[in-house]
Image (spheres, grey):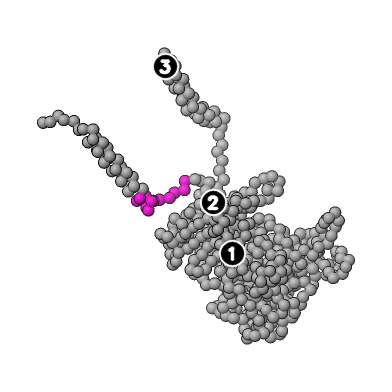
Amino acid sequence: MSDKQPGKWQWKLNLFIGLLLVLALYVAVNGIAFKHYYRQNVLLASSYTKIGGQTVNLLKSLPEPLTIVNYVSANNDAVTQLIANDVDTLLDEYAYHGREGAVSVSRVDPYLNFDAARKLAEEYKLTTQENVLIISCKGRRRILSYGDLADVDTSQVGVGGAPRLESFKAEEMISSAIQSLVQGKRSKIYFLAGHGEYDPDTADRDNLGYSILKSYLERQNSDVLKLNLAELPKVPEDADLIVSACPKSRYSSYEIDVLKNYLRHGGGDNKGARLALMLDPGTVSGLEDFAADYGVTFQNDMVMGKFALVGRAQIVANAVVTIYPNHPAVEWLRKSGVALELGPMRSLAIVSGTAKEPPAAVTALAQTPNLFWGETDYQSPDIEFDAARDFAGPLTVAAAVDTASIGDGQVQLKGVKIALIGGGYFLINQKIDAKSVDFFINLANWMLEGGRPLGIAPKTPKQFTVALTSKQIASLTTFLLMFPLAGLTMAVMVWLKRRR
C-alpha cells in the first residue's frame, strides 16, 4: 500500500470544492426560504398591527391586482408621527398575505421622492401637507386620510404632553375600502343645477366654484355630475347621492315633487334616498320643507361670534364648530377635537314631536360653543345679541336624518338619509381646506355607505409595565454588571501574565 500523503494542490482543490458545495447549499436554502417562509411578530406592543382572518380571506380572493401607495411625510402632524411605523408594518402584512404579486405596496415621501410625489399630486390633487393611503383596484380608487386610521388623544399636547394612541382602526378602514372597490361600482353624485347653486364644473381658479371639492369626491371612487330637475321627470336611477349646494332661488313645485317622490321611493336597484341640503343664510329655496318634515328647521339667522381682533372686539360671521355628537359621520372630529371654521352659516333647530314623516333618528352633527349666537337682524349695521329675538348658543349648524340604519349603522336598510348643513360657503374653491373636505367626505361616505365596516374591531394597544421589588432590581443590576466586570478581570489577568 502506498503511504503517499495528498499533495498541496490536492488539498487546495478539495478545499475549493468544499467551499463551492457550502456556497451552493447556502444559496439553495436562502432561495427556498425567500419564497417559503413564515412571519411572526413577537413584539407585544405592536401586536395590533397583525391582520385578521377576514382580511386574509379578502386578500386571497382579489380578482385583480391591488395597489396601495402610502403617501406620507414626517411632518408636524401628531397623529401621523404616532402611527406611521404601525401603518408601514400593517401594509407589509397586506403585501405578505396577498396572492403572489396581487398586492403591491409602496411608500412615497413628497419631500424625498419628488418625481413620484409630483405625479401623484397632479393625478389626485394632493398637497405636501396631506398624509393619505391611495388604494387602487379594478380601475377604481379610494383615498384614506391618516386621521381616519386611528383614534388619538391629543388633549395633553397643548400642555406639553404627548399624543396617546387609543385605538388603531387602519385594518378596518383599509379592508372596507378594498371590499368596496372589489364589489362596488363608482358612486354617482348629482349636484342640482338651475337655481344659482355652487357649480362643481368651474375651473379651479374660479373662487366661487366647487371644482376642488369635485376632484376630492372623484378621488373617492365617485363620479360627479350635474342635474337640472326642470329637464327630467324623475331623479336618475343610478343616483347614489343628490346634493343641493346652496340654491339662490326657489325651486318650482314640479321640482319639489320630483324630490319628494325620490325621498318616498328611493332610487333604482332598490336603493334608499340620499340627499344633502346646504342652504346659505338669507335664501329661500323651498327645500326647507324637507327638513321640516323630519322636525328640523332652517332658521332665518346668521351665526355670529365676538372676537378680540387687533386690540378690540369685533363681531364676525364665521361659525366655528367644536362640539360633535357620537355619530359615524363626525366620529373622527369628536375623537381628535378638531375645530372647524365654516364661514357664514345659519343655525338649525331640532324640534321633537313635529315630524310629519315616519320616525327617524335626527342627530345634531356639529355645534358651535356658547360664545356664538344666531343673529336674526344680521343686515343691520349695529349687531349685538338680543335675547328677545336672537338664538343663544350653542347652535347646531349641521344635522343628520336617518331612517335606514339599525345597530349603530351596522345594518343598512332601504330608507332615507339626509344631511342638513346651514351653508356651503366653506367648500368653495377659495375657502376649502383639508378639515372641511374631510368633514364633507365623511358625511358623504356615511350616506353612500361606501366602505361599510366589515365588523373588524379597532385594535387597542396593550399597555404593560414591569414592576420590580428593590431586591429584584439589585439582583438584576448585579447580573448585568457581571459580564463587563468578568471581561475586565480577564483582561487584567492576561496583561499581568504577559508582563512576567
Residue 337 placement (x, y as % from top left): 68, 56
The answer to whether 45 appears left or right of 431 in the picture is left
| Part of the protein shown in magenta | 31-42
- Whole-Å distance between the Cαs marked 3 and 1? 73 Å
Amino acid on which the number 3 mark rests in the picture: Lys
Amino acid on which the number 2 mark rests in the picture: Asp
Number of the label disc, if any, that sits on residue 86? 2
The answer to whether 289 appears left or right of 40 in the picture is right
For image coordinates 70% across by 76% down, the residue present is: 197
For image coordinates 61% across by 62% down, the residue present is: 126
Which of 230/337 is in front?
230
For disc 1, the marked residue is: 122
For disc 3, the marked residue is: 497
The answer to whether 208 appears left or right of 238 in the picture is right
Residue 333 placement (x, y as % from top left): 66, 59
For image coordinates 87% across by 69% down, the residue present is: 380
Number of the label disc, if any, that sits on residue 100? none
The answer to whether 225 appears left or right of 352 in the picture is left
Mark 3 or mark 1, which has the lower sequence index? 1
Q: How many neighbours does mark 1 have within 10 angstroms: few (below 14), some (14-19), or many (20 or more)?
A: few
Furthest toward the top, the residue is 500
